[in-house]
Amino acid sequence: MARLPRINPTGRLARNVMLLRFFAGVLLPLVALWFVFTHVVETRGEAAAAETAARSAQRVIDSALVSTLDSGDLVFPLAGDRLAEVDAVFATLVGPGVAADDLRIVNAGGVVVYSFDHGEIGEIVELDSAERGALDGTMSWAVADAEDGGAILSYVLPVRLGTSTEPVAVVELAGVDDVARGQIRGHRAGIRLLVGAGLAIVGLIQLWMLLHLVRNLWSQYDRSRQMAHYDPLTGLANRLYFHDRLAEAIASADRRDGNVGLVMIDLDGFKPVNDTGGHAAGDRLLKRVAAKLSEVTRREELAARIGGDEFAVVIPQLESPGQLAQMAERLREELDLGVDFTDGRAIRVTASLGLAVYPIDARSPDDLVAAADIAMYGAKATRKGTSRNGGPGGGEPGSSDLPDRIFR
């Protein structure tokens, strides 16, 4: 059907706002939850991988130290040939299970008896909590990210010699552990994939539920809007919607210094059709009239059923007098209808049209409707078919001529 464009279309805006609220209220928390949950699980996974690597390193260190060092080596700093021998032993530890980019041994008194950095040998350090824990037999470890995306692991491990179960020193080593790095990388990738997939499924379910809800809400909204703005029998705009759109058209004309045309239509012969064929015949006639109006009016124009057998057409951007005259003539021709009945009787139905132009014939929407109504009743009384009532801008009563000079 023909209708006026909405001045303030809110449907699309409301849908966009609802989608934005969905992203802000559902998806963003899901993304935040993904980061938090992934971080927590990754941290625990890294700790498990680091502990495995630390136990592996402890076994290798224990084996190497027992076969290389004796208790005397842990009393004083290593030097000379003995230092060279220990260097050679620890050089072989770089391999699967142990990272040894940095290694030193500190005895219970805090003396550095051995270090990859020979400059540290002989230094006395204050034992920290990890070192004191190692002297009590507890392993400790830490994980840091390497520049290549791997994992730098550092260990503080107890040193036991011979058959003694009591730690006599502490070994500290750090480096990129290939085995642990592979475990951590695999764990990270698996956790991110698992958590991401789970949250994606939750998000899709919520999105489906929201879209389903939105469709239902907008369907109800469209039905309510249809009932509020359109005539249920003909599908044309009802009286309320007609007045709203006429006011909007006039406001728009004021902004662009334009004109608005209005055609009021009353059917001649509708009552005999109703009396002869009943309300069903009358309803069928009204639907035929509505279809004709929809065919004649353009997209930017509005066809409305005002009530009973009275209709109206709004031309929001009237460009010339001839445009309104042509519209009226075509409407009059299209609404010259014949109604045949089963008993052989036929009734001819025509239309009386009243024309008015804003701001020539009126200065307000109500006055424009009144001017068109007066012209319509004048046409009905004189059986002219079409009439235009004179207004403050010009035009004589009963005339359908619209002088060009008064058009804005």
Image: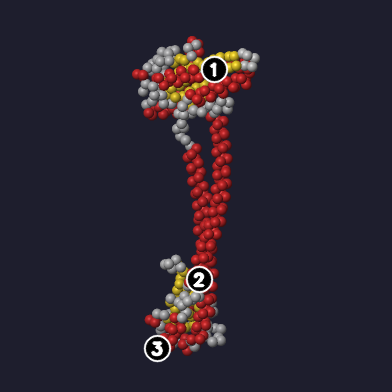
Q: Residue sitting at 46 percent across and 29 percent down?
A: 299
The three-letter code of the residue at mark 3 reads Gly
Q: Residue at x 44, y 12 (%)?
A: 398
Instruction: Give the residue at mark 2.
Output: 180
Q: Position of residue 406 (x, y in %)?
A: 36, 19
Which quadrant would residue 364 be assigned to in this image?
top left
Q: Residue 78 appears at what percent x and percent y?
A: 42, 86
* Mark toward the start of the polypeptide (2 vs 3): 3
Dot 1: element: strand
Q: Report the quarter where the C terminus lies.
A: top left
In the current view of this chain or complex, which residue is farthest to the right? 343
- Dot 3 or dot 1: first in sequence order is 3
- Mark pair 3, 1: CA separation: 122 Å
The image's mark for residue 209 is none
- Residue at 54%, 54% (x, y): give it: 200
Q: Which residue is mark 1?
A: 337
Query: Which residue does the numbered mark 3 point to in the structure image?
Result: 80
Which residue is the extreme one toward the left?
405
Residue 111 visible in rendering:
no
Q: Position of residue 82 (x, y in %)?
A: 43, 88
- The crowd level at tag 1 (other Cα within 10 Å; few <14, some 14-19, many 20+) is some
Of mark 2 and mark 1, the one earlier in the sequence is 2
Real-space CA distance between mark 2 and mark 3, rounded to the nearest whole angstrom: 35 Å
Residue 327 vertical placement versus 29 (above, below): above
**Residue 311 visible in the displayed image:** yes
Q: Mark 2 belongs to which amino acid?
A: Ala
Q: Nearer the viewer, mark 3 or mark 1?
A: 1
